[in-house]
Amino acid sequence: MSAELKPTAKSKALSRRSLLGGSAAALMACAQSPLKPALANPPRLLPAPELAEQAPAVPREFRAAWVATVANIDWPSRKGLSTAEQQAEVRTLLDSAVALKLNAIILQVRTSADALYPSALEPWSEYLSGTQGLAPEPFYDPLAFWINEAHARGLELHAWFNPFRARQSQAQSAPAASHLSQTQPQWVKRYGDQLWIDPGEEAAANHCLAVIADVLARYEVDGIHIDDYFYPYPITEPTSKQELDFPDEPSWQRFVQSGGSLSRADWRRRNVDQLVQRMQQTIRLSSKPWVRFGISPFGLPKPALRPPGIAGFSQYDKLYADVELWLANGWLDYLAPQLYWPIKQAPQAFDVLLDYWHAQNPLQRHIWPGLFTSKVTDKADSWPISEISAQIEMQRSRAPATGHAHFSMVALLQNRRGLALALKQGVYGQAAVPPATPWLDASQPEPAPTPLLLALPSGGQPDAAPAWQLRLPPGKPAESGRYLLWTRHGEQWRWQLGSEFVIAAQDLNALVISRLSRVGIEGPRSAFRLA
């Protein structure tokens, strides 16, 4: 993210259970010890189709937080933590996300042509051990761990890649022998105090796509995500104060000598356009075409299309990112423009920019703005916490199924100025499920089967509140294995998302269940009375 440079209690994972919309405390208590034989017979479930539509609609909103690994912004909190410490921090971050009623994490897995997972294509990231190329010890797969722990809590996990950066300014480790700067030095250019992969090198683009295809093939990610670093943000020469051009002369000359007629700026934009389009194609042609493709570009429009009063940096002219073209062609599933300015800052007015991006969206892709939540600090220039809540309310007013992403998770984890608590008590008072993405697959899931209802033991505590465990089959490989479950206690309906549930037995008299497809479409509801 352009804002990149800008505590750890352990808890056990709830395998295939959801905390979304449920009681985290009750579920965590059940997860502390293995289930013992049931102490009571559970009630019978009798089909009751007349109840199917009595359960309310589930709120839809994408609520995500970026977890930046570069420079140890969010995770791990520092280099060199043990495997156990890293895993404990993962659980703490995810438990905090669940408590806040977020439903997605955007995890940075490739910061600088490196990997936060075992890869035959790129070396281990230095932000784990402190040494690039060094695996965690004892060995584990961080990405697989994140996915398993996130899914166990009902959270989506989107894998975030930086396509072109090869070394970040705060990097300290010597490059590993397998790093692109060592194996393919002709692709890598020094620009200021960082290294960048030249987007004009076709073989380098092919390598980036191979990295993404590898993750798609091996991991059950819910999304593939790239940020705003296309060509690098421009820097100036210290003495002359002149802007330095990106050093891509060799690839540019090859284009010219091959008969290319584009201007250099248009050629650079074409390089980025082609990579974006090919990323989408890579996902669609993979074995997991339901995976969503998201981009979080700099938030200002191209100058020629800006609304009156909007001014500032041009990513179209400086980063060579034609975001409007990508939206018009539907080369992405969600756009998370980084609207990192307060509502009252007129040259970058949040509401004007939000409306602009919605208007540039003829194919009705998701528009989920990025919020600069990390501007809430303990410093004098901190944003008030009300700014974040107001921006969330503003995006909700624009469409019935909306969303947003926080940069970044650390601000929420630290509950800066009471921010997390204020969100939980205010705009996040109710849980939500991400909006459906029907253009990927409009088919409706099959009706939910009859669940298996089991009694939970009291654990030796005679005054423990009775509860039932509800299990459902995982579904076919092409299905998500996730269900929406409504429980009626007296006359009050509650809902959860998951595939295995713990539900309070008190006053429980009805259940309604539906499958949720991999792209978020709800199937027919099955309803049951308890007898």
Image (cartoon, helix red, strand yellow):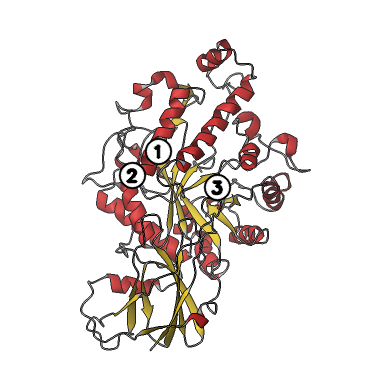
- Residue at 23%, 72% in the rendered image: 33
Per the model, the C-alpha gap separating discs 3 and 1 is 17 Å
Note whether 335 is above or below 466 in the view shown.
above
Identify the mark at residue 260; answer none if there is no mark: none
Identify the amino acid type marked 2: Arg
Question: How far from the left and from the top, in percent, is residue 522?
Answer: 50, 65
Query: In terms of secondary structure, where does tag 3 sit?
Result: loop
Looking at the picture, tell me which residue is in the foreground, 133 or 271.
271
Identify the amino acid type marked 1: Ala
Q: Residues within 10 Å of mark 2 (few under 14, many from 20)?
A: few
Circles 1 and 2 in contact, beta carbons < 8 Å: no
Name the N-terminal-most of marks 3 and 1: 1
**Can I make out residue 105 in this image?**
yes
Q: Residues within 10 Å of mark 3 (few under 14, many from 20)?
A: many
Question: How far from the left and from the top, in percent, is residue 482?
Answer: 41, 63
Task: Look at the image and tell me in which quarter the C terminus lies.
Answer: bottom left
Query: In this view, which residue lies farthest toward the top?
Result: 257
Residue at the disc numbered 2: 218
**Can I make out residue 7 in this image?**
no
Looking at the picture, tell me which residue is in the foreground, 218 or 311.
218
- Residue at 68%, 40% in the rendered image: 301
Residue at the disc numbered 3: 333
Query: In terms of secondary structure, where does tag 1 sit?
Result: helix
Question: How far from the left and from the top, in percent, is residue 382?
Answer: 58, 53
Circles 3 and 1 in contact, beta carbons < 8 Å: no
Per the model, the C-alpha gap separating discs 2 and 3 is 21 Å
Note whether 103 is above or below 354 in the view shown.
below
Query: In this view, which residue lies farthest toward the right?
Result: 308
Name the N-terminal-most of marks 1 and 2: 1
